[in-house]
Amino acid sequence: GATDAVWPLRFDRPEGGELVMAELRGRPLLINFWATWCPPCVKEMPELDRFASAHSATLGVVGLAIDRLEPVKQFLARQPVRFDVGMAAVAGSELGHMLGNVSGSLPFTVLLNAQGALIHRKLGETHYDELTGWLKSL
């Protein structure tokens, strides 16, 4: 399926090192596509962070930045998050498209279950209570 494209991918982390998507396989995963130049993305970051922290025993959360390294580093210095961030650029846009983001707009968020099936997706800003509701279908 479309989610097969997720697992071979590897992204540079803004702090250095590599985010290896295959290492996140086998448990539910929330993927958020975002950018520093996208106001709703920036607005939902604290919500995503709170969600990632509250539900870290249940699922992984990854933020894929469709952006350049410097703005992302500066943003994360001001607004640290407790989930993994990958510098996704063009590969991230292509992945988003494969997962159903045909317009290429941001933010775009998907939830995969432990088997890797796509069970929720949303284009546009999300929030803590909505994401928590998604967990009921895991």
Image: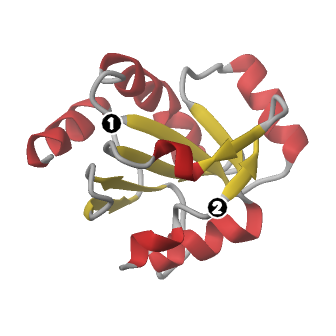
Residue shown at 40% from the left, 20% from the top = 50
Colouring method of the image: secondary structure
Residue appearing at x 53%, y 61% in the figure: 7
Is residue 122 toward the left or the right of residue 37 in the image? left
**Quadrant position of residue 106:** bottom right
Q: Residues within 10 Å of mark 2 (few under 14, many from 20)?
A: some
Q: Position of residue 131 (x, y in %)?
A: 26, 39
Quadrant containing the N terminus in the rendered view: bottom left
Name the residue at 73% across, 51% down: 11
Disc ID at residue 45: none
Q: Name the element at disc 2.
A: loop
Give the secondary structure at mark 1. Answer: loop
Task: Work out whether residue 93 or residue 74 is closer to the camera in this orientation and state it.
Answer: 93
Identity of the amino acid at label 1? His
Describe residue 109's horizontal placement relative to residue 120 as left or right. right
Within-10-Å neighbours for mark 1: few <14, some 14–19, many 20+: some
Going by the numbered disc 2, the residue's amino acid type is Leu
Can see residue 24?
A: yes
Left or right, residue 82 beside residue 27: right
- Relative height, residue 5 to residue 136 (above, below): below
Whether residue 100 is visible here, answered yes or no, is no
Q: Nearer the viewer, mark 1 or mark 2?
A: 2
Q: CA distance from mark 1 to mark 2?
A: 27 Å
Q: State left or right for residue 73 relative to residue 55.
A: right
Could you say which is closer to the camera, residue 96 or residue 115? 115
* Percent position of residue 52, x then y: 40, 26
Q: Earlier in the sequence, mark 1 or mark 2?
A: 2
The residue under label 1 is: 127
Q: Which residue is mark 2?
A: 9
* Residue depicted at 58% across the width and 38% down the height: 42
